[in-house]
Image (cartoon, helix red, strand yellow):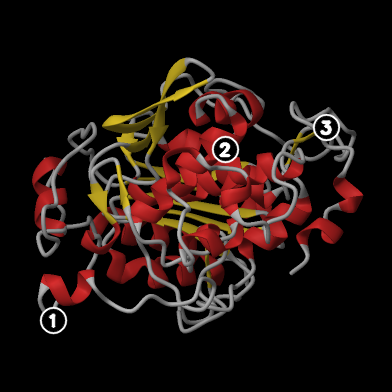
Amino acid sequence: MNTLIRRLSFIALLLPIFVTPVQSQSVYYPPAGDAWEERAPSDVGLNSEAIDRAVEIATNHENSVERDLRIAILKGFSSEPYHYLAGPVRERGGPAGMIIKNGYIVAKWGDLNRVDMTFSVTKSYLSTVAGLAWDSGLIQNLDDRVKEYVWEERVFDGEHNSAITWEHLLNQSSDWYGTLFGMEDWGDRPPRDGDIDTWRMRELHEPGTHYKYNDVRVNLLAYSLLHVLREPLPKVLKREVMDPIGASTTWRWFGYDNSFVMIDGLEMQSVSGGGHNGGGLFINTYDQARFGLLFARNGTWNDRRIISPEWIEMAKSPSEPNPDYGYMWWTLKGDTDWGNVPDHLYYAAGFGGNFIIVDQEKDLVIVTRWLDNSVLGELVETVYTALN
């Protein structure tokens, strides 16, 4: 896609993003703090019994990962050679979640203020930071080669790596090879069959043709964005997104112990896109729900445009290498089947049963923490029966 042409109508958007009147005041947004209004499901057109069943599913099906996430991470990725903890880890809490309709809380369960790891849900926040860079014009075109923006440490040298574009990093089709912060690309989720040398010396796929979920390459995107934005990504996210939507001050975004780089003479940490080796986003359920509501409202909060609708449309659109995946958001456009659930919704997903599910058409957000993955489709389908 020619993203330069597609973004001409947004050329006036510069960081920091200017306030633009875009929403009627009759649309409810929760204020900062704890005063988030609650409504009975029936008050917003939902079937109360169906919502109660959804909450029952969530509370009765806790994910089996250990509460001690150090053990869970090391066990969960034990098939990876040389896998280790490189960033912070925190013991997890119990099942928690919220169902938001028309901006109002219609159901909630668990400790919503507890700050927990959220693993690969972090990737959807990272994608959003990339969207801020694109909206502002710091990234001119997603079809641009990243080497045109990032030349330090020669991470995009060579015939293969030099062909990688921003879009390839965003939809995980780059097949980048190399070492970043001491971690080898091939060591992340290698095939279970075959020896290490065979996988390490594998034939590379042309960038853009093959999807491969890989945290080293996701961390490469974070590293590249750090060099473009020239300030820590958590600082950008806080100023441009989390503060405007009234998020708490308790969330944190970590990298690895050795992922510090020099930018403009200052040492900054390059954050990770998940908790695969520790680190990533640590956040409470209320703040996850605010982030989901921002997307349900197509990037606006009250009268402020935070993220452009065009970016959100691209982020949630299926990619050619994997129709179930956009720009670090999951879709239902491929093989995923959640039963009687519309395929226009999209979601963020993380290890251990962490999800943010967004339906812009229905103004609906579902957040779950530590849910058994096997009942996710049943939970979401049950919520949709409440809409009928």
248 versus 296 height, above or below: above
Report how far apart the C-alphas of labels 2 and 3 lie in the structure: 16 Å
How busy is the neighbourhood of tag 3: few (under 14 within 10 Å), some, or many (20 plus)?
few
Which residue position holds label 1? 193
Report how far apart the C-alphas of labels 1 and 2 lie in the structure: 42 Å
Report how far apart the C-alphas of labels 1 and 3 lie in the structure: 54 Å
223 versus 346 height, above or below: above
Element class at badge 2: helix
The circle on residue 303 is: 3
How busy is the neighbourhood of tag 2: few (under 14 within 10 Å), some, or many (20 plus)?
many
How busy is the neighbourhood of tag 1: few (under 14 within 10 Å), some, or many (20 plus)?
few
Image coordinates of residue 345 in percent, x first then y, are: 60, 66
The amino acid type found where label 2 is placed reads Arg
Which residue position holds label 2? 290
| Sequence-first tag of 2 and 3 | 2
Element class at badge 3: loop
- Residue 246 figure quarter: top right
The amino acid type found where label 1 is placed reads Asp
The amino acid type found where label 3 is placed reads Asp
- Residue 212 figure quarter: bottom left
